[in-house]
Image: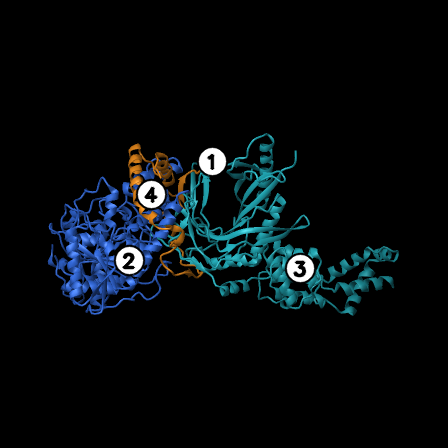
Amino acid sequence: MEITTETIRHTAKLSRITLSAEEEKGMEKHFAAMLEQVKTLDTFDASAVSATAHILSSVNVFRDDVPGEPFDREKLLSCAPERDEDSYVVPRVVE
Amino acid sequence: MSEYIATIGLEVHCELKTETKLFCSCRNVFGAAPNTNTCPVCAGHPGVLPVINRKAVEYTVRAGCAIGCEISRFSKWDRKNYFYPDLPKAWQTSQYDLPLCIGGSVTFDVNGEEKTVRLNRIHLEEDAGKLVHSGNCTTVDYNRCGVPLMECVTEPDMHSADEAVAFLEELASIFRYSGVSDCRMQEGSIRADVNLSLSRPGEPLGTRTETKNLNSFRSVRRAIEAEIKRQTEVLESGGKVVQETRHFDDNTGTGYGMRSKEDAQDYRYFPEPDLMPVVLSDADIERIKADLPELKRARRKRYVSELGLSDYDASQLTSEPEIADLFDGAVKAGANAKKAANYVMSEIMRKGKTAGEDGIAIGVTSVQLAELLSLVDKGEINLVSSRDVLDKMWLNPNESAAKAVDELGLRQNNDAGEIEKLVREIIAANPGPANDFRNGNEKVLSFFVGQLMKATKGKTNPKIAGELIRRLLSE
Amino acid sequence: MKDMVKKSLAEIKEDIAAGRVSSVEVTEAVLESIKEQEDLGAYVTVCAERAMEEARAADKAVAEGKSAPLLGVPIAVKDNICTEGVRTTCASKFLENYIPPYDAFVVKKLKAAGAVIVGKANMDEFAMGSTSEFSAYKVVKNAVDPTRVPGGSSGGSAVAVASYQAYASLGSDTGGSIRQPASFNGVVGLKPTYSAVSRNGLVAFASSLDQIGPIARNVADCRTVYDVIKGHDAGDSTSYAGDLDKGADFTSLKGRKIGVAKEFFPAALNATIRAALEKAIKFYEDNGAEIVETSIGSFDMALACYYILSSAEATSNLSRYDGIKYGRRAEGCKTLDEIYYKSRTEFFGAEVKRRIMLGNFVLSSGYYDAFYLRASKARTLIKKDFDNALAGCDALICPTAPTTAYKLGSNAGDTTAAYLGDVFTVPVNIAGLPALSVNCGYDGDGLPIGMQLIGKPYCEKTLLSLAEIYEKGGERV
């Protein structure tokens, strides 16, 4: 498999990150090195092994449908970079 | 040139009516002030972890049982990753390859014919927040974030707006009857995406489009009709339908394609490491199934076959689970089925409907209703004054009908001797109309009844009154 | 630096409890030590005022005759563990101003145990790195040789303990981030069994691998802190509700079996490190333990498996940093996309971006099966190999890291080479097992060498006993 600039750009888009031309190149190199490492995974027959969906074997971890104490809205909103009285604010979203 | 056939599949999202959200103990309520039902978990703060609401799983399984799904013995959770301001974690916790319910079907009537639509699956996921656009800004409210949502995916078994809407109505009714969702369109607690393609008979299906987030039955109908028209025009003019996500504007009644970034969406699903799988035994499923009440179609059939009601009455009484429950309860408490049906359909439904456009608000218990009907039956009160009793009992479940009758002084006069005396006085005071009757004018009878009721403030047994007036006028 | 800061946690706790010294005095001494050694970069945030308040409260509790496992003892907490009201940055520019609205489960536990939290320990940004050079604020320096890296990502936590800026600390370990810096600084670090310590409030890097654990100057102190922080938490669905003490406390090695898996001793292993480990193995054998040879056949796959799974989870976990709800937003953004792109480009460091990119690549459409799915299957094999190997012994012994602490900046050009330093630690996270690193000697430059003991699930006691016996009697190279 070859890592192209196209792949890097698409992945950067998925990541919402802008890369300079130089960073793109560095990333290409990094990806290529990682793919080399990943070849160690080619040594087993994947069809014969089931994936580990979870490292633990427990199941059915639930909580009861009982409301907790309301959380102070201000404690959350005060963390926001932009807000108004009761909400988070972003530039108008165009759909 | 032969007609195109539309092939339609729906993805229906229903909010579950749990007390709390799917993964945190914030309240699941509609209409609260922005961001008042949020906490670090549903606001996606660093370091937070989800814990599944047991009830949400049970409700989804119950819904699945109601439409004959196969319930998964093993299901798990996955992350659906995308950036949007209404999604604070930047992923939606959903179920990708192992949903809670598989298959199932819904049978309903459309234009007088029975139709069955198959379901592909029902899975459980969390709702996103709400964006409000104003001026240059969009504000974000996370109250709805994490509210449990069932996504029901149908097979492409529908071919018209009528079918799609009838299906949705039936599905909503099943979920309401099952007690898992209010399915209130007004509150956005049921929403649908429409997948639609056109083809000529015998030919493979055409390219489909997906119209997202329709939040009323009316917009589902309009969006389907508009999309069929649009795709037909595209094809007729030799063009090609583009696979895309579309949005339907309820104000203009037209759909438009969303910009291609939506189409290039790559959700990068992978198993949610913070949640353990759900494993259900046969016993678990049986227990949940046992909680399932009798559903609409079954009740409707029973009302006709066992209670002898007309098909029309049965369908009226089963239009909302609250009404059917009230009716069933009253009959169980001893009320005559036909009389109870008439009373519920006339008095109760009229009064309940005023409570809201979506659904109905019933303010009387079945026991109260049965008692009231028995008082009417025994002639203790008449139908007209029963309304005052109903008003007094409404939203007051501890009020007994008999007590209300006494307090309102509505117990009617059944003493024929006393009534006769009054009638004689009224006839004497109105010689003109009395003569009219004797000359064959039956209509004036009601005038005398009216006069009698006026004199007794409605507290006269109308049956006795009618017979007496007729006899005395004929003397 | 006052002498009292050099005492062990057990000693200072005794002193405070007996009224020989007040927590206020101890905390002042530690804060002074922190100030003197600011150059080491062990802390991102020092919470002097709060610490003094907590110290006064501890003194009051002592005066009232109360006791608690950490009453009045100054402890450091890694800066990716949420502390209500105290800035928690994960050593990232993104969270420069983030003050969590809640305490992590382990922080509640520490507070309930009477601990004084003196500060938030420096680290690699979002715990991604093995040198602590990727802190967005300042580089952490090795406590033994400040020209060298302290290891990472819990570099600050290890250095704070090793240089007497705290009696113990909490770190987090996703692929070796507690054990490797413990090794590089000559202290004891325990990565508990996955699920033994609640992750509630630990800023997630790779959720299926992350685990909080203690770092201390000796095994007994490590045990004390572990006993405080372990335990079931209903707020973490992956928290273990069963018996967390499946292992045993013991003082004799009679009947104990220690496994040596050949894959952990490759031919190219540094000779000094090999010699130190061989000496430790001999100690165990001489003192009655049976040494058994075993094998982890899937060992070679661990690194690739780790980087795929951890990056995939990280990419998702770190998508929440979007400049909307908390943390920083880039200046002058006019559209939503600008907020995403500019904020994430400006406030994430290079290493974090590499991991996010790799994670998105391995999860993206068309590549999932070849990478993520295959790595999940490799995980099954690795876990099985460990289960088999551990079925025949109480613990595996191996080096914690293939090298001792190297010079600052020496990995700058080659990130994948740095990844190789995790080769002995990542398999443990993949298998979800407990492991402990304890010093077993020094190399020619006087740099500490760590040995790693890997145990069965929930058998931390066994590891701590084995390490303590060695600590008391073992002769170092």
Q: Is disc 4 in the same subunit as disc 2?
A: yes
Q: Nearer the viewer, mark 4 or mark 1?
A: 4
Q: Note the chain letter of the cyan one.
A: B
Q: Amino acid at mark 3?
A: Lys
Task: Please name the color used to draw chain A.
Answer: orange
**Gap between marks 3 and 1 measured at Cα:** 48 Å
What kind of element bears circle 2? Answer: helix
Q: Nearer the viewer, mark 4 or mark 3?
A: 4
Q: Note the chain letter of the blue one.
A: C
| Res. C397 mark | none
Chain of the residue under label 1: B
Chain of the residue under label 4: C
Dot 4 and dot 3 residues touching (CB under 8 Å) = no
**Gap between marks 4 and 1 measured at Cα:** 27 Å
What kind of element bears circle 1? Answer: loop
Please tell me in which quadrant of the rendered image residue A36 appears: top left
Name the residue beneath numbered marker 2.
C107
Q: Is disc 3 in the same subunit as disc 1?
A: yes
Residue C217 placement (x, y as % from top left): 17, 58
Q: Amino acid at mark 1?
A: Arg
| Res. C358 mark | 4
Please tell me which residue lies in front, C90 or C262. C262
Residue B468 placement (x, y as % from top left): 81, 64
Name the residue beneath numbered marker 1.
B259
Specify the farthest residue to the right: B439
Name the residue beneath numbered marker 3.
B301
Q: Which residue corresponds to the image point at 39% horizontal and 36% vertical from the top-left?
A: C335
**Gap between marks 4 and 2 measured at Cα:** 32 Å
Q: Is residue C238 left or right of residue C176?
A: right
Q: Indicate whether C465 appears above or below C431.
A: below
